[in-house]
Image (spheres, helix red, strand yellow):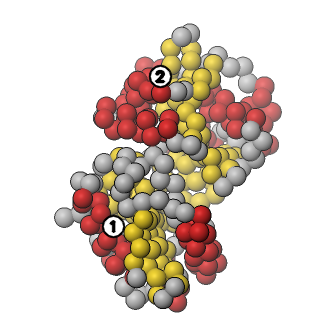
Amino acid sequence: MIKELNRVSDDVAKEISELVEQCNNYDGIEGIIELDKSINFNQEMNTIFMAYEGNKLVSVLSLFVPGREEAEVSAMTLPDYRLRGYFSELIKRAEEEIKRYDVPDLLFVCNGNSANGKAVIAKQKAIYEFTEYFLKYNHKFDPVIKDYSYRIKLHKAGLEDIESIVKINMGAFHNSYEGAKSLANAALKADNREVFLANIEGEFVAKGVICFENGGASINGLGVLPEHQGKGYGKEILYSIIQRIMEYKIEDICIEVESENDNAFQLYKNSGFEVQSAWEYYRKTIE
């Protein structure tokens, strides 16, 4: 039996969590299944695919689709049920779904230490594209954050600020106007996200997003307008957002960065973040 869902109930989330725990214990890695769909560009798209044998969940596949360009894939199958075609059926269903929404590519996400995951992706003939590092904040850096001399003022953004966010997304990440606006709109409306802008002398020059999940917080979408890069504003908004998270009494703070973005990688490592794991991304274009 296959279930296809566009939202996750607490009971389903618990089922998936138990499967993830069993797989991670067996494989000796920290794999994840992405369940947060709050910024997917279309909330009606089915993004959770679950395979059952009887009443037992044996395989799950999740899609993260913030834009129309690609769908990120994370998947796991219980050890005793691997090589039985469950993943193949789930990926077939996922491909059929994204075709309906004109999403051309799948982007498989795999823990860098997962030999099994890499073997499965190789059968999909997906091509390696980049590695993303997952970093966790070390609170030994707190004194630097608290004593820093800030030039920016941190502004919590609302829907009235969407064009400023779009401008930064387009300049910093080379998004199209439509893609940048879709991402900004979704982040502003999501219950588990807060968007912040860096104000310097009346101009918004940088942005960042806090995502709250499982009692922790991740920092996403840090970007600086091209004409203001190299002035330290990226570091200032990063520090300011860390301070804001600490005000919420949240200890677990993380951030992710692509391997080719060396400037951001060095900034995070010099700002109290330590590498915890590496995630490899492989692209497959759907025919």
**Residue located farthest toward the left when viewing the structure as drawn:** 287
**Residue located farthest toward the top when viewing the structure as drawn:** 201
Q: Earlier in the sequence, mark 2 or mark 1?
A: 1
The 10 Å Cα crowd at callout 1, few under 14, some 14 to 19, many 20 or more, is many
Counting from the top left corner in percent of width and height, residue 133 is at: 54, 53
Counting from the top left corner in percent of width and height, residue 71 is at: 36, 56
Q: Residue at x 42, y 65 (%)?
A: 5
| Res 129 visible | no
Q: Quadrant of the C terminus?
A: bottom left
* Residue at which label 1 appears: 94
Left or right: 194 with respect to 163? right
Q: Is residue 198 above or below residue 260?
A: above
Q: Residue at x 50, y 35 (%)?
A: 188
- The picture quadrant where one finds residue 94 is bottom left
Evaluate if marks 2 and 1 touch, with contact meaning CB atoms under 8 Å apart.
no
* Residue at which label 2 appears: 160
Q: Residue at x 58, y 44 (%)?
A: 192
Q: Nearer the viewer, residue 34 or 128?
A: 34
The 10 Å Cα crowd at callout 2, few under 14, some 14 to 19, many 20 or more, is few
Name the secondary structure under disc 2. helix
The mark tally for this picture is: 2
Q: Nearer the viewer, residue 171 or 37?
A: 37
Q: Residue at x 78, y 25 (%)?
A: 147
Tag 2: amino acid:
Glu
- Whole-Å distance between the Cαs marked 2 and 1? 36 Å
Name the secondary structure under disc 1. helix
Counting from the top left corner in percent of width and height, residue 2 is at: 39, 78
